[in-house]
Amino acid sequence: MADPVADLADALTVGGYRLGSLVARLTPAPIARGTLWFLAPGLALSQPDRRRMIERHLRRVNPALTGLALRRASQQAFDSYMRYWAESFRLPSLPKRYVDRMFTVDGFHHIEDGLALGKGVILALPHLGGWEWAGRWMTDRGHDLTVIVEPLEPPELFDWFVKLRTDLGMNVVPLGPRAVPAIGAALARNGVVCLLCDRDIGGGGVDVEFFGETTRLPAGPALLGLRTGAPVLPTGVYFTERIDGHHAVVRPPLALAREGGLRESVRVGTEALARELEGLIRRAPEQWHMFQPNWPSDPGWTSPDRPDGRI
């Protein structure tokens, strides 16, 4: 039986994102950024649970953060998240030349070297900064880019986000049964696959130490790298001080090797990835958009594999 209240809430959610996208596209960047800075504190105050969660994560990155410094850093995380949405909304309407001018990158040769091997490349990213700007920049340069994304509710909202990213030139695949064959096909045609991998959403992850506490990170990047020979490149994308400015850092490929059984090799590879993710996040922890429970000690945390939350 249909739930009219839930249906109305879903419609308002989808409508809100569509309206935000329209406003962002019609508003000059300086005005849009100023408006977001004005609205972000209200967003943070209206979501105290998310503020407390991001404060927990920020202290994992930097245990010295306390008091006012911690509050300021958590507010910067909300500011960064608002900027992410505003710039993502505007991306489809921005000229290619402008996107290129506002983007810089260190280590792009690692992607080029990986593609020269002919086995595709896997970019392993944390939820950091404005990675979709980098995706647009890559597709503008002619790269075949496949992104694996978390399904959203309601389905209409997910479909809208898929269209947004498709308009940027990306091949968008939802996390689930379709993801593995889609990734295999992308790598087989020497494409670039983007995997957000600082949170185990789909289950089947690997127990690793991440910022000093054991949790689970996705096994996919290391497993795919071992099975296909595609280089796995830890990558971070950051906002810069310039309006619409973005900077990417592409790290050297993980040193993946079959040592013992496949399970142990994946664990070792995922541990190495965790160290790389820590380094990328420490460059700008206030741009890390991790507002959800991500460790067993976090309030509300449950393992994707076990409803009781144990690992």
Image: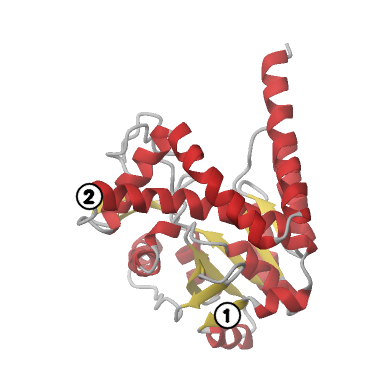
Q: Position of residue 246 (x, y in %)?
A: 57, 71
- Which mark identifies residue 183? none
Work out whether residue 200 can be spotted. yes
Residues under labels 1 and 2: Cα distance?
A: 33 Å
Disc 2 target residue: 66
Q: How many residues crowd around disc 2 within 10 Å: few (fewer than 14), some, or many (20 or more)?
A: some
Image height of 1 relative to 137, above or below: above
Q: Tell which circle, 1 or 2, labels the residue nearer the N-terminal end.
A: 2
Q: Position of residue 249 (x, y in %)?
A: 48, 76
Figure disc tally: 2
Q: Residue at x 23, y 56 (%)?
A: 212
Which quarter of the figure has residue 34? bottom right
Q: Residue at x 32, y 52 (%)?
A: 58
Q: Position of residue 219 (x, y in %)?
A: 45, 57
Under mark 1, the amino acid is: Thr
Which quarter of the figure has residue 271? bottom left
Q: Secondary structure at mark 1?
A: strand
Disc 1 target residue: 104
Q: State how the image is colored.
A: secondary structure
